Image (cartoon, helix red, strand yellow):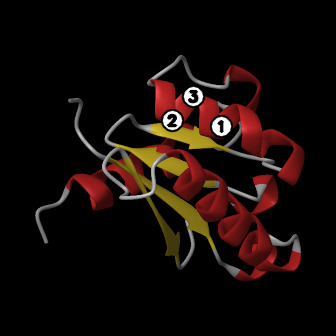
Amino acid sequence: MSEQKLVYVCEGGDCSEKGSGDLHDNLKEMLQAKDPSEEKVRVRRYPCFGGCECGINVTVWPDRLFYSEVTEADLPEIVDQLVADGPAVERLCNKVQPDVEEMVWSLLDSPY
């Protein structure tokens, strides 16, 4: 089995205003329908990624996928990608500044 994925949904002010709380809940519900014991994927909230202008932001670790401008309509494709270990949803990638992504990966890679 591949390494368990951790999916973080930003809950910073801008993303929250755009509906990240509901998006988190719906994503979690959709993933639990396909992976009820969370063996492959776990969904968590994250305080803020710093890519506010591109929200709603969702990251996938350890895959280092940084999805931006995510909407409810994107969730089925994201869920399929996560559960099947498929390719990234490219249209949602590379929207934030590279240094924002690197900062997030540094934090998530940290053993603390």
Q: Which residue is mark 2?
A: 82
At label 3, the amino acid type is: Gln
- Report the number of numbered marks: 3
Residue 88 lies, in percent from the top left, at 57, 23
Residue 25 lies, in percent from the top left, at 68, 71
Measure the C-alpha gap from mark 1 to mark 2: 6 Å
92 sits to left or right of 82 = right
Nearer to us in this view, 41 or 18: 41
Quadrant of the drawing holding the N terminus: top left
Q: Which residue is mark 1?
A: 78
The secondary element bearing badge 3 is classed as helix
Q: Which residue is mark 3?
A: 81
Residue 97: name its quadrant.
Answer: top right
Against 53, residue 25 (above or below) is below
Q: Are marks 3 and 2 in contact (CB under 8 Å)?
A: yes
- Label 3 neighbourhood size at 10 Å, few (<14), some (14-19), many (20+)? some
Q: Are marks 1 and 2 in contact (CB under 8 Å)?
A: yes
Inspect this view and state whether residue 73 appears: yes
At x 56%, y 42%, the residue is 66
At x 88%, y 44%, the residue is 73
The secondary element bearing badge 2 is classed as helix
The secondary element bearing badge 1 is classed as helix
At label 2, the amino acid type is: Leu
- Label 1 neighbourhood size at 10 Å, few (<14), some (14-19), many (20+)? many
84 sits to left or right of 97 = left
Residue 40 lies, in percent from the top left, at 35, 44
Inspect this view and state whether residue 50 appears: no
At label 1, the amino acid type is: Ile
Q: Are marks 3 and 1 in contact (CB under 8 Å)?
A: yes
The residue lying furthest to the left in this view is: 111
